[in-house]
Amino acid sequence: MSIFGEMKARSIGPAGMSGRVTCIDVIESDPNTIFIGTASGGVWKSTSGGATWEPIADTIGTLNIGSLAIQQSNPSVIWVGTGEGNPRNSQSSGFGLYRTLDGGKNWELMGLENTRNIHRVIVHPSDPNTVWVGAQGPAWGDNENRGVYKTTDGGKTWKNVLKGAAGVGIADLVIDPNNPNKLIASMWEFRRNPWTFNSGGEGSGMFITHDGGETWVERTEKDGLPKGNLGRMGLAIAPSNSERVYALIEAEKNEVYRSDDGGFNWVSVSKDENAFNRPFYYSDIFVDPENENRVYSLWSRVSQSEDGGKTWKVIIPYYSVHPDNHAFWIHPNDPSYIILGNDGGMAISRDRADTWRHIENLPLAQYYHINVDNELPYNVYGGMQDNGSWRGPGYLWSRNGIRNVYFEGLSGGDGFDVVPDPDDASRYGYSMSQQGYVQRYDLKTGYSKGIRPTIADTIELRFNWNAPIAQDATDNNTIYFGSQFVHKSSDKGDSWTTISPDLTTNDTSKQQQLKSGGLTFDVTGAENYTTLTCINPSKKDNQVIWVGSDDGRLSLTQDGGKTWKSLEGKLPGMPKGAWIPQIHPSNHDVNEAFVVVNDYRRNDWQPGEIV
């Protein structure tokens, strides 16, 4: 038996800050039974209205969930599409469509593995053998397996009934609650590269079918939609009046559009900045099931319109429940019951969005990095997507278990690597947010000092979204930090020296991140490129430092930074320019290191082996 054969993982949390919820569905005949899909935490079920939860799909091929649909006529049947439909730089990809016939005890792969990201699943309300799937496809390159898929035999076979170009996928897909043969789809042309993102193009558009998807008609500027290239669209049909249809449309100007004749003709009803923003990441709109004029829009905040989309007010501010909202469910017969999913987990309202109860027992945190200290008991450190950096106990001297309140916040934003100070880990350390904003924290006083390196001359530093930091193994005062250079501090971040040349390709054609976004300008640092991604000094010899970059450079110094050599050419089988996220020097042999390489950001999904 393996030496690790009897070891089992144990959950230590945290759940207080949770993580991104991408989809929600509820058994309408039993509204206390809730199912949610999460960006990288699988599928969860509650039978108590959200009081308690259990994971039910940890055995399927991936925990990256994009869509979920219950067969309401038989709620034991649930369809789950993997791969989330929110294509930011940290998007999680999937591996096909799954179905359970017994409420989540057992799952079966139903195909569509090559779609990568399934953003919508719709089950025919009276014919459970008919299911539609909206495949968005990967953000990182062309893929022929996109568009709307339909099965009429319960998933045995699939037909691609609406297909665009290889760079065009589904942004939204909705069904008329009163006419299951009518669906509206928004096709979206988009592309993410490690150094830029583009939303919009000639392939985007709105398509409507009245025969269950067999034929589709595109709506264009002749029908009132915007002229020129379109981007992402969010769609909603009013359950109480199917003639009322809404669309959030990204175009040269982002506006709310409305149709009062079932989608045949459209007019712009609002340019209100409170309606929505950052359409590539959100673009979801929902109509109150009893009031066709009450509309909800999900974006960084949540907005509501009471006059058919003309005027909007923010009902959930940025610092209220949690920002960045992606999932929404309204009870079809009781619109006061609403469930919201966002980057911080989920919340439930029972009074039509006036007050919310944040769910604090869903351990969905999306960690970028994990670290530990040598305290007794030891602490676990890490930073999470959109939930800051934290530390919490690895175990306790009590029988009560680890609770959310035992986790301490260190810094905000997206959280990344956390390095405890080995001189006094109970009090000091270093934590980061995006684009290299690193700070030295003091848990006793609560004071944090920004220590990001700067260069006094004309050289502008480039920091990765997930910049690298490292502690010297033999000198507790020395830390390293990465831009395109390696920076060294011998006084715990108070001052810095640069000990390397530019260790990237410095390809200026891939340094256009300030122009990123496409139709909607979007510059957050997620597309910073030609940057360092990992710095790893040897524990055997602190003169030996290994460095990797996002553009395929592997560098090594053996004299503390005086001289450097490039080693990427010595990695057999490594695609030129591939991303190097991690390097692990051996604890035993100063000449040995393990290098991790991936290339999915250039749409290369094949597993490789580099010896």
Image: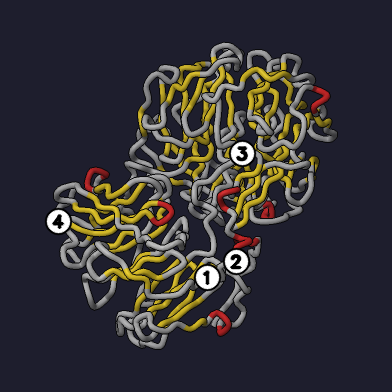
In three-dimensional space, the C-alpha distance between marks 3 and 4, rounded to whole angstroms, equals: 52 Å
Quadrant of the rendering where the C terminus is positioned: bottom right
Quadrant of the rendering where the N terminus is positioned: bottom left
- Circles 2 and 1: CB distance less than 8 Å? yes
Mark 4 or mark 1, which is nearer the start of the sequence? 4
Quick check: 118 left or right of 542?
Answer: right
Amino acid type, label 3: Thr
Per the image, the residue denoted by label 2 is: 507
In three-dimensional space, the C-alpha distance between marks 2 and 3, rounded to whole angstroms, equals: 25 Å
Crowd tier of the residue under label 3, counting other residues whose Cα lies within 10 Å: few below 14, some 14–19, many 20 or above:
many
Quick check: 463 left or right of 130?
Answer: left
Q: Residue at x 47, y 35 (%)?
A: 341
In three-dimensional space, the C-alpha distance between marks 3 and 1, rounded to whole angstroms, equals: 29 Å
Quick check: 40 left or right of 263?
Answer: left
Q: Nearer the viewer, residue 515 or 44?
A: 515
Amino acid type, label 2: Asp
Mark 3 or mark 2, which is nearer the start of the sequence? 2
> Does 159 sit above or below residue 241?
below
* Helix, strand or loop under label 4: loop
Q: Position of residue 107 (x, y in %)?
A: 57, 50
Amino acid type, label 1: Thr
Kindly report which numbered mark, 3 or 4, lies closer to the viewer in this rendering. 3
Q: Nearer the viewer, residue 123 or 403?
A: 403
- Circles 3 and 1: CB distance less than 8 Å? no
Per the image, the residue denoted by label 3 is: 520
Asked which quadrant contains residue 564, the reply is bottom left
Per the image, the residue denoted by label 1 is: 504
Per the image, the residue denoted by label 4 is: 397
Amino acid type, label 4: Trp
